[in-house]
Image: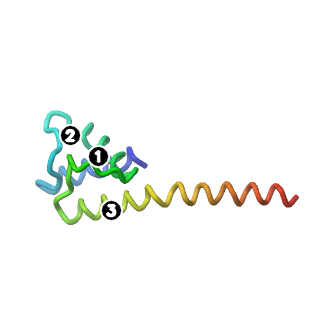
Amino acid sequence: IGMFCAKFYYLIALHVPNAFVGVDAKSPQLSFVYYSFVTLTTLGYGDILPVSEFARSAAVGEALLGQLFPAIFIARLVTLQSDVRKH
């Protein structure tokens, strides 16, 4: 998920000028990998900021996905375990 979002942020940056502030111009792809995982885990250090509306929306979506994925995954594991115990 993190790598997919990093590529998505990179595409946003290519098509929307100044969509992000704080991205290293020498290695933007690496900056977006870092930013993606910081956003996915909802750490939010604030060193890279989404400025455009589209970039902000993408960051919010990734943060929500970062919270929902573990919750759904754990719920599924618990359901599978309880089904095993019933049989």
Q: Earlier in the sequence, mark 3 or mark 1?
A: 1
Q: Earlier in the sequence, mark 2 or mark 3?
A: 2
Residue at 73% in and 56% down: 80
Residue at 30% in and 51% down: 44
Other residues around mark 3 within 10 Å, as few (<14) / some (14–19) / many (≥20): some
Q: Quadrant of residue 58?
A: bottom left
Q: In the structure shown, which secondary structural element does the residue marked by tag 3 occupy?
A: helix
- Amino acid under disc 1: Tyr
Name the image colouring. Answer: rainbow
Q: Which residue is mark 3?
A: 60
**Left or right of 80, for residue 58:** left
Query: How many angstroms separate mark 1 from mark 2 (CA)?
Result: 10 Å
Label 2–label 3 contact, CB within 8 A: no
Q: Which residue is mark 2?
A: 28
Q: In the structure shown, which secondary structural element does the residue marked by tag 1 occupy?
A: helix
- Amino acid under disc 2: Pro
Other residues around mark 1 within 10 Å, as few (<14) / some (14–19) / many (≥20): many
Q: Position of residue 12 (x, y in %)?
A: 23, 54
**Image: 5 above or below 25:** below
Q: Nearer the viewer, residue 17 or 49?
A: 49
Query: How many angstroms separate mark 2 from mark 3 (CA)?
Result: 20 Å
Q: Quadrant of residue 19?
A: bottom left
Mark 2 or 3, closer to the camera? 3
Q: Position of residue 62 (x, y in %)?
A: 37, 57
Tell me the number on the disc at residue 35.
1
Residue at 43% in and 59% down: 65
Q: In the structure shown, which secondary structural element does the residue marked by tag 2 occupy?
A: helix
Residue at the top extreme of this rendering: 26
Which quadrant does the C terminus fall into? Answer: bottom right
